[in-house]
């Protein structure tokens, strides 16, 4: 008596059979087995695809910004528009967001870097002007920190204290007396 290799059922001579792995199997067993295998493969493919979709959704969550952050971002965009003389493009918006996300910059720091490079160092604007930020950000932050410290120190001094710092001297200028013995230059030359 032959047994079906797939489900180990006895094979009767009147049943349709076919070769499978060197032995015989019922055609109905073979088709049910292949349909189960297809279902398993489809489920595995779906399961493998689901985590990838979840990773894509969670890899870039929507970042909510505060009103202050939004205002700071708009100040950066306005400064760039003033520099270039054009409205900001999508590339500019994307780069500012990427600098904040990738490098941990904040919009106020980006504005400081731009002001430092284009106003204090007096560099001419080129291109979209935002590309220089990663290269000068740390240097600009140090300079702007020093500048704000100096401004804070100077704000503590009032005008009366400044007058006391520098002593005043009264200087009188005497008028010269007109010289009586002046020579007429026009008489010297020849006639």
Image: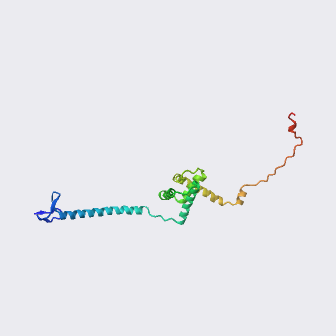
Q: Quadrant of the C terminus?
A: top right
Residue farthest to the left, as pictured:
1
Q: Position of residue 88 (x, y in %)?
A: 54, 57
Q: Position of residue 49 (x, y in %)?
A: 34, 61
Q: Position of residue 105 (x, y in %)?
A: 51, 58
| Residue at figure coordinates x 32%, y 63% from the top left | 46
| Residue at figure coordinates x 57%, y 59% from the top left | 78
Q: Can residue 56 be seen from the camera position used here?
A: yes
Up/down of 28 relative to 189, above or below: below
Residue farthest to the right, as pictured:
180
Q: Can residue 143 be seen from the camera position used here?
A: no
When asked about the image quadrant of residue 188, the answer is top right
Instruction: Specify whether 147 is left or right of 30.
Output: right
| Residue at figure coordinates x 37%, y 62% from the top left | 53
Instruction: Specify whether 139 is left or right of 2.
Output: right
Q: Position of residue 1 (x, y in %)?
A: 10, 63
Q: Nearer the viewer, residue 188 or 146?
A: 188
Up/down of 119 relative to 40, above or below: above
Q: Nearer the viewer, residue 177 or 127?
A: 127
State how the image is colored.
rainbow
Instruction: Specify whether 54 is left or right of 150.
Output: left
When asked about the image quadrant of residue 141, the answer is bottom right
Number of callouts in the render? 0
């Amino acid at each position: 008596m032959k047994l079906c290799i797939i489900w180990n059922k006895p094979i009767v001579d009147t049943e349709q059979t076919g070769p499978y792995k060197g032995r015989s199997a019922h055609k109905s067993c073979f088709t049910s087995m292949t349909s189960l295998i297809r279902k398993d493969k489809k489920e595995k493919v779906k399961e493998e695809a689901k985590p990838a979709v979840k990773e894509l959704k969670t890899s870039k969550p929507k970042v909510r910004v505060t009103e202050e952050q939004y205002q700071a971002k708009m100040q950066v965009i306005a400064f760039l528009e003033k520099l270039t003389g054009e409205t900001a493009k999508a590339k500019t918006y994307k780069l500012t967001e990427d600098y904040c996300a990738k490098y941990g910059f904040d919009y106020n720091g980006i504005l400081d870097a731009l002001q430092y490079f284009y106003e204090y160092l007096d560099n001419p604007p080129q291109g979209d002007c935002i590309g220089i930020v990663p290269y000068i950000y740390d240097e600009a932050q140090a300079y702007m920190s020093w500048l704000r410290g100096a401004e804070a120190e100077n704000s503590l001094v009032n005008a009366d204290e400044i007058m006391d710092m520098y002593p005043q001297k009264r200087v009188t200028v005497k008028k010269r007396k007109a010289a009586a013995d002046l020579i007429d230059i026009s008489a010297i030359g020849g006639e």
